[in-house]
Amino acid sequence: MDRKGLTLNGLTTMHMLHIFNSLAMIVVGVYLTMHYYDTLFPTTLGQASSLCDISSFWNCDSATHSPIAAIAGVPIAFFGLLNGIMLLASSVFASPAFEKTCSAVTKYNAIGTIVLMIYSLVALGGLCPVCSIYYLLSWVAAFLFFKFGENSWVPDLKITGIFAALLVVSGAAIGSYTKGRQEKQSKVAVAVIAQFKALADYGDPDMPSPFSLHKATDNFADAPLRVSIFSDFQCPFCKVVSDQMPALVRRYGSKLNIQYFFYPLDSNCNPSVKSQMHPFACRAAMLSACDATKFHKVHDEIFENQASLSLDVLAGIAEKNNLKECFESQSTRDAVLASMNAATKFNLRSTPTIIINGKKIEGSIPTPQFFAIFDELLKK
């Protein structure tokens, strides 16, 4: 007669569910570990996947930047990966002792994920969507062993010792790798800060823009971190900068103001440009400038459609947001022109141009370099 055991009686339906669940835990653990390094130590622009960033509530970046994202340089996602490997190994090396160990580990892991979820909701004000998938998988694992396997809170000492040794060795290797990435990034940050300090101080734009991407204070000049972006909706690197802004807001939102200035590289509205380098840039600017209360939403929609931008696409966005009159409005054209005139004091030569607390940066920079500059400014 078969004894009670999730992994001890061959490939039963519940045993197969356990295998698939363990594999899913491994996949999620690998993704979250990679996301940790891609987000905190990127080597290229836009390296971190946006799969995790759905909204201000559902996003992985808040968790990745939190104080508990890593323990001694080891991402906590890596521990989740090892947990999935151990659970999968219980099917390959099935034994009562292994089952007993997994039963205990899944219980403690489930409790740990509940603590993490509460921390995310209370301290971070949101949830990491992929982390939440891992939480669910952890609870399924605990339920399977509780219901169909050896129900134990006490693991086998020998098997626990083997996996503890594996954890120590692999954790030390990962911690050393993280330290190397940190040292390399710190050297880059020191150089970036020195270069930023050496830049000429132009001051903030002479007029605040009515088009805001984020407001920590009603008066633009009152925030300790002030970013003014001169941008073109058809400029690829302007889209890169646009995509970076949510990460900056999540990390510095209470201290950060971000305002947007139109600078379309299109002779249809920009007298400083001699050609239609970006033939839809002026109409895109006029559409987003039509209603300041809808600016952020329209700004995001235009950039989301940048690759396929056309007159029809812009007309569709205008109709969707009830802004069809914008293209013929003189007041809208005046708003775009006023925005472009604000660029004069900065001797603008290209887009994007970013003004951070009065200092001009031409082009886009990696997100960690924004972090380094902002952290240095906040020290003052």
Image (tube, grey):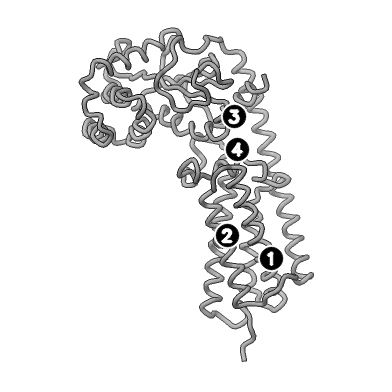
Rate crowding at label 3 as few (under 14), some (14 to 19) or many (20 or more) other CA atoms within 10 Å.
some
Q: Amino acid at mark 1?
A: Val
Q: Which-is-in-front pick, marks 3 and 4?
A: 3
Classify mark 4: helix, strand or loop.
loop
Residue marked by disc 4? 41
Quote the CA–CA distance across marks 3 and 2. 31 Å
Residue marked by disc 3? 371
Residue at 32 percent of width and 36 percent of height: 305
Quote the CA–CA distance across marks 3 and 4. 11 Å
Q: Are marks 4 and 1 in contact (CB under 8 Å)?
A: no
Mark 2 or 1 closer to N-term? 2
Quote the CA–CA distance across marks 4 and 1. 31 Å
Mark 3 or 4 closer to N-term? 4
Q: Is residue 355 above or below residue 148?
A: above
Of residues 166 and 119, the one drawn nearer to the viewer in this rendering: 119
Mark 3 or 1 closer to N-term? 1
Image position, residue 250 (x, y; %): 54, 35
Classify mark 2: helix, strand or loop.
helix
Rate crowding at label 4 as few (under 14), some (14 to 19) or many (20 or more) other CA atoms within 10 Å.
some
Q: Amino acid at mark 2?
A: Ile
Image position, residue 341 (x, y; %): 37, 10
Residue marked by disc 2? 26
